[in-house]
Amino acid sequence: MIKKIVKFIIGILIIIVAIFTTYLLTGYEDLSVLEENMKTVKLNKGSHLEFTSSGEQSELSSEFVTKIENEIEYSENPVELLRNIYNWKKTNIKTKHAKGKYIGKRSIEDILNEMTSTGCHDDGIIFSSILRHYEIPSVMVDAVGISWIGKYNDGKTKSHNGHVFVEVYYDDKCFLFDSTLGKIVVGYDPENKVIPTTLWLMDSKGFYTLHKGTDPASYGIKSVRQLNDELRSFAKASEGKTFELPNYKMISIKKVKFGK
């Protein structure tokens, strides 16, 4: 028993050191440099309208619009605004993991009423809803873990693994944002469904996009059971398939220099 506890503690310490080391090795980046390396994507009027319109779970009431505008410092630059939203979320929104219990069920109103996030789906709703309020085209990206696919098909796991990101568009630029970890994925191509991992603890090989939309309701996900069914079906259909990881750059939103 003691040996198991010691091994567990050592494992936790290794994880902490790995995360801290990764953070230290990620240098500060000028915003102008990041923007130069963002993918050029020109949205047509239809896509722009779709990506700035609220969905069933992402409509902000006037009460919460006032709260957001009063509590989050606005910036004309979406990356800086994103940083301000992230800092606000870390300070004000409590994390209460629910193992996916509320996937497809909670709206931005529910999240802000309770001031809690139950996971990456809630995080994606928070950021995309607020960005769209400021007419910044934003899309939730619901993805499955690539490493998990192999483990599931080999019978090595009965759990499920996925993650949610947010696509952000502005000035004919596009980047991906990990709204849970606060990582910007630079060079991201929205046409490429493969996403490198933003933290190896989540999935060592990255993720594959299953759905995109304004919120889970917009792409038909109403429960964690339904999502897990889709993950398993995709895993079986992808057995033996290899996924080529794109060479994107990742930077913490905290380490972007805004020239001030």
Image (cartoon, rainbow, N blue to C red):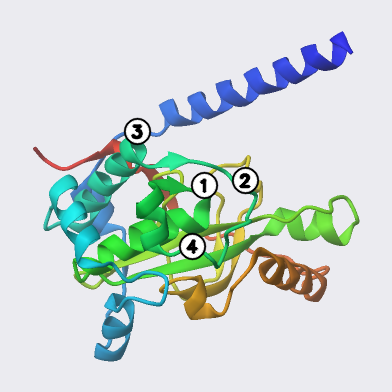
The number of numbered badges drawn on the structure is 4
Q: Residue furthest top?
A: 2
Mark closer to the observer (2, 4): 4
Give left or right: position of 245 versus 69: right
**Disc sitting over residue 198 in the figure:** 1
Q: Which of pointers 1 and 3 lies earlier in the amino acid sequence?
A: 3
Q: Residues within 10 Å of mark 4 (few under 14, many from 20)?
A: many
At x 58%, y 74%, the residue is 221
Q: Residue at x 38, y 43 (%)?
A: 251
Label 4 and label 3: CA atoms lie apart by 36 Å
Residue 43: tell me if it is visible.
no
Q: Nearer the viewer, mark 1 or mark 4?
A: 4
Q: Toward the viewer: 240 or 209?
A: 209
Q: Which residue is mark 2?
A: 202
Q: Does residue 101 appear left or right of residue 259 in this picture?
A: right
Asked if labels 3 and 2 touch by Cβ distance under 8 angstroms, the answer is no
Where residue 132 appears, as percent x and y from the top left, is 26, 69
Q: Mark 4 highlights which residue? A: 106
Q: Are marks 4 and 3 in contact (CB under 8 Å)?
A: no
For mark 2, give the secondary structure: loop
The amino acid on which the numbered mark 1 sits, given as a three-letter code, is Thr
Q: Give SS at disc 4.
A: loop
Give the mark, 2 or 3, whose residue is nearer the N terminus.
3
Amino acid beneath label 2: Met
Residue at 41% of width from left, 51% of height from top?
Answer: 179
Name the amino acid type tagged 3.
Gly
